[in-house]
Amino acid sequence: MKNKIIILTLLGCLLLTFIPKDFPPALNADEAAFGYNAYSLAETARDEYGSFLPLRLKSFGDYKLPLYSYLSIPFVKIYGLNEFSTRLLAQFSGLGLVILLYLLALKVFKSQSVAVITLLMASVSPWIQLFANQAHETTLATVFIAATLLLLITYIQTKKLSHWAGSILCLGLALFSYHSAKVVFPFLLLAQVYWLIKNKGWHQLKTQTSAKVLIVFAVVVLGAFSYSEIKTPPARVTNLFLFSHPNIDLVTNEAKIEARFSPFQFRAIVGLREFAARYFSYFSPEFLVIKGDDNPRFGYSYLSPLNFLEYLFFVLGLYYLFRLKHSFRYLLIMMLLSVPLASSLSWQVYSLSRTHALIVAILPLSAYGLYSLFKHHQVLLIGSVTLSIGLSMLSLYFLNFHYPKRALAVRAWQAGYQELTNYLQDNDSQYSRFYITKKNGQPYIMLLFYLNYPPAKYHQQARLSAPDEYGFGQVEGFDKYVFNFATPDNKAQNSYIGYPDDFDETELKTLKLKEIKVKTETMFLIAD
């Protein structure tokens, strides 16, 4: 019976991952960047700027970590460059994460019931589904972090060095998946070294001349390279870093005006206070149950990562974890305490993507708390699980079928470029230049993506401008596409593509404008 439950639940995970949805409402520029770089690497072994097998993708000047693009190469080769092939790795990662959480709960709590409850919660978790349906690297990083923890716990139990080496390898891969993993890395590495010494595996490792030693050496070298950007971080990282953000100076100056002298006037104190406030807020019900992420691309207000029952049982899980002096309580607490550090060091308030790995500890603990409370009351146990799953499925319904229709979502996801590309292809021979507004994100990467523009041809034209105040550069143009809206000129054989507010009232009345509309929103107006 238990095996049947597991099989049916896995089938449910598969259906939830691959059933047609309206979410996301469009492909965004970051997704297009991962997809096009995978395409470029598959065709030329170089990224969009012509760098040979890079360990970072220059992209918009934010220097994305490259693993998502590298692992997407087979999908792009098989299915071509499109939205499906670009997002397929994220979907498999989401499904893999669900299975890993089941295995982790089974390994940690040694209870089939806790593991199945974890699996059920994970299969309908809005937090997992939100990122499993878009080409975002955070799910991939969380998969490697979960695998790192699972293999480390397996090594603690079996003392087999191969499990420890596998844990180290997964941790090294996490470093090249998403930037937030770099903050979790030192804590997990210390845990691995501690248990290696405690299990007397250090002497065993020294006698090994096999691939295990090479794995450890490779992770150390690659890890050192990964952290080399600390000396010269990308402008995007500097812009987001809490202690270098100009708002810290504004808050400090405000404190100086309010009081002649106070220890809280100093910039470092203000920064630490802001950091602490952000850090502890990530464990609050306001973030986990009520608000979620403020970024409209990652849902909307009151689409929360957890429902109130999951949060309640998570708190109970922590209680039982220490009351029963569970063997792996400190490892789980380490995961909980280390993950929010990356997001707390950013000026941005509430980020579901940077704290995605919290789910590795939260969902198993929630299942453990639920089971521990009702394990002797089968009716209450089944009722609580059913109610929790129902609340999560309600959130999924809003995410997949209501949210994508909202005007805010359509604009946040930079919709309209696929329709614009169809226009460009149909009218390519009629115009010598296409002047396109750059108000809607990074238009160059969207065109490269939807046009399947030959990478070798683009390498010769790729030029990125200096970073703006947000840390992003811009590509001013390639081929016959110029990403700078110009006033329409009837004498020139050009096409002018802008936002509605790019045209003045006279032009809106006198010009025959074509409209690119997505759902209720006019995304582009075209003056031929």
Image (tube, rainbow, N blue to C red):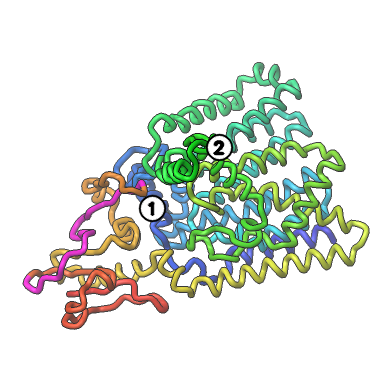
Task: Name which of mark 1 and mark 2 comes first in the sequence.
Answer: 1
Circle 2: residue type: Val
Camera sees residue 228? yes
**Mark 1 crowdedness (10 Å alpha carbons): few <14, some 14-19, many ≥20:** many
Residue at (9, 74) in percent of width and height: 490
Q: Which mark is residue 342?
A: none
Circle 1: residue type: Ala
In the rendered image of this protein, does residue 251 appear above or below residue 482?
above
Residue at (67, 43) in percent of width and height: 336
Q: Quadrant of the N terminus?
A: bottom right
Which segment did they paint magenta? 471-491
**Mark 2 crowdedness (10 Å alpha carbons): few <14, some 14-19, many ≥20:** some
What whole-number distance in Å separates the C-alpha atoms at marks 1 and 2? Answer: 24 Å
Q: Nearer the viewer, mark 1 or mark 2?
A: 2
Disc 1 element? helix
- Hey, which quadrant is residue 311 in on the image? bottom right
- Residue 293 is left or right of residue 74, and the answer is right
- Residue 153 is left or right of residue 268, and the answer is right
What is the x, y in percent for residue 205? 66, 21
Residue 489 falls within the magenta-colored stretch: yes
Q: Quadrant of the C terminus?
A: bottom left
Camera sees residue 43? no
In the rendered image of this protein, does residue 346 appear above or below residue 6?
above
- Residue 422 is left or right of residue 126, and the answer is left
Disc 2 element? helix
Q: Which mark is residue 33?
A: 1
Q: Which mark is residue 183?
A: 2
